Image (cartoon, rainbow, N blue to C red):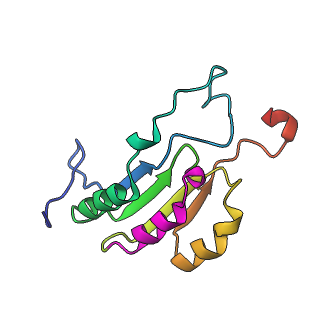
Amino acid sequence: MSGSRLYDNHGRPITYLRLAVTDRCNLRCFYCMPEEGIKYLPKKQLLTFEEIERLIRILASMGISKVRLTGGEPFVRTDLMKLVRRIVAIDGVHDLHLTTNGILTAPHIPELKSLGIASVNLSLDTLDRERFK
């Protein structure tokens, strides 16, 4: 499969994968979570870490070099850092990025730095507690 490339409809090579590792979140932002809530996928329907790693390995062999993990909130996924360690070890993946609300991130910052995470995108609507409500 090595050598096969992915291209968009305009003939441009696709080098970027955005992957939601969960649909769950620890916040209830109005634009993302309706008042009546959402129906979460059963956990057994989520990709396992082994399936995610295999998918990224295959895509890396097809030219994907940048991966962004998102959610929901990725850090509510149990043992997310195990997955992060596995992804940074994949040949061909040069940049791993995370999008998070930041609430659960602080304990992981030293390891994220040591693993060479390219960026952490904090999704912040406001720092004003009243406006957030």
Residue 97 position in % (x across, y down)? 50, 61
Residue 58 is left or right of residue 108, and the answer is left
Establish if 118 lies above or below 4. below
Q: Nearer the viewer, residue 71 or 77?
A: 77
Q: Main secondary structure of the magenta part?
A: helix
Residue 65 is left or right of residue 111, and the answer is left
Query: Residue farthest to the top?
Result: 36
Q: Is residue 70 magenta?
A: no
Q: Is residue 79 magenta?
A: yes
Q: Nearer the viewer, residue 131 or 83?
A: 83
Residue 9 is left or right of residue 27, and the answer is left
**In this orientation, does residue 15 appear?**
no
Looking at the rendering, the stretch of residues picked out in magenta corresponds to: 74-90
Residue 130 position in % (x across, y down)? 87, 35
Query: Residue farthest to the front?
Result: 44
The quarter of the picture where residue 57 lies is: bottom left
Residue 47 position in % (x across, y down)? 38, 48
